[in-house]
Image (tube, rainbow, N blue to C red):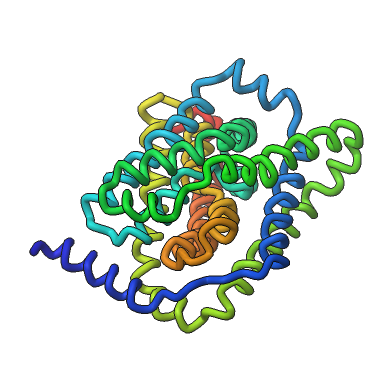
Amino acid sequence: MSTSSSTMQNLNTAAAASIEQFQMSPAALLALNAVLAFMMFGVSLGLSKRDFVHVLRRPVAPVTGLVAQFLVLPAITCFATWALDVSPGLALGMILVACCPGGTFSNVMTWIGRASVATSVSMTAVSSLAAVVMTPFNFALYGSLNPHTREVLQAIALPVESMVLIVVMVLALPMVLGMLVGARFPKFARDSEGYFRTASLLVFLLFVVVSFSKHWQTALQVAGSVLILVIAHNALAFLIGDISARVARLPQAERRAVTMEVGIQNSGLALAILFTFYPQAGEMLVIAGFWGVWHLVSGLSLAGYWNYSNKRLAGTSVAPVSEVG
């Protein structure tokens, strides 16, 4: 047996031996979905028709990001978990996260990293709408393509129509409402957008902490093994975004925006789907939960590095950021 196979078996054994069922009350489940809808509403206050027009006028960067996000990342995740013999529950959790659209905090991180916010915002808007179809479709497709996860996927009876409904309720509908409110009350949108972002981040982190508080012993037991998978998976997502953008020969500002958008997945949506339809899927829930925390750490770290490198570059060169690299 190879070293990599032995290591992966140890990870699977450690996780499977200690993961228990994660249960949520109807009130807590409603709260999670409300938090996700609140986050999407707040982000969408600053959206307008211009953001969708931006995709039509300059489609290369957004389309590159969407292809990387909805086609490349789920496919590579599927075959990587198959090749590495990741346990079915953990593998399905990774596949589900890979099938979700970009996270709502990617725009903020793109701004901190001094990348193209217009590209990031347009990708978030389009990917959130595309997720209504692509997230359930990709999860069903790649979950069944991996022979290790196929039986588990069939056993949990994937409710495609219900998944579509929850994506509409927590992403599409709040986005439309946010855009309408932002267009009708532009001053309110400008003044409150920052508060919405901050409140969304704090509430989401609080919800993750509360969700795992009843299972802190389990979380500690599997932290090392699962965190390795989550860190590697998140790094893969960032790498796919960066390579895709380089292949498309995007300027640096747009390349960084695409990288961030692909690397920051909407793990909150994954948690909502799991808590709603698969409350017994402990391994999948642990993956999504750790993703929800780790991608904030990695995304902010990467954005901070970009910001620092831009400041250093500004001190030695007068070249615009978007034309460097």
Q: Residue at x 10, y 62 (%)?
A: 2
Nearer to us in this view, 38 or 309: 38
In the rendered image, residue 250, in percent from the top left (x then y), is placed at: 45, 26
In the rendered image, residue 41, in percent from the top left (x then y), is placed at: 75, 45
In the rendered image, residue 198, in percent from the top left (x then y), is placed at: 73, 57
Quarter of the picture containing the N terminus is bottom left
Nearer to us in this view, 98 or 307: 98
Q: Is residue 8 left or right of residue 40?
A: left
Q: Residue at x 64, y 46 (%)?
A: 166
Q: Is residue 264 left or right of residue 147?
A: right
Q: Is residue 192 left or right of residue 254?
A: right
Nearer to us in this view, 26 or 120: 26
Is residue 224 placed above or below 238 in the rendered structure? below
Q: Residue at x 36, y 27 (%)?
A: 247
Nearer to us in this view, 119 or 144: 144
Residue extending furthest toward the top: 57
Q: Quadrant of residue 200?
A: bottom right
Is residue 59 placed above or below 288 in the rendered structure? above
- Determine if residue 315 is in view: no
Is residue 43 placed above or below 325 in the rendered structure? below
Q: Residue at x 76, y 34 (%)?
A: 176
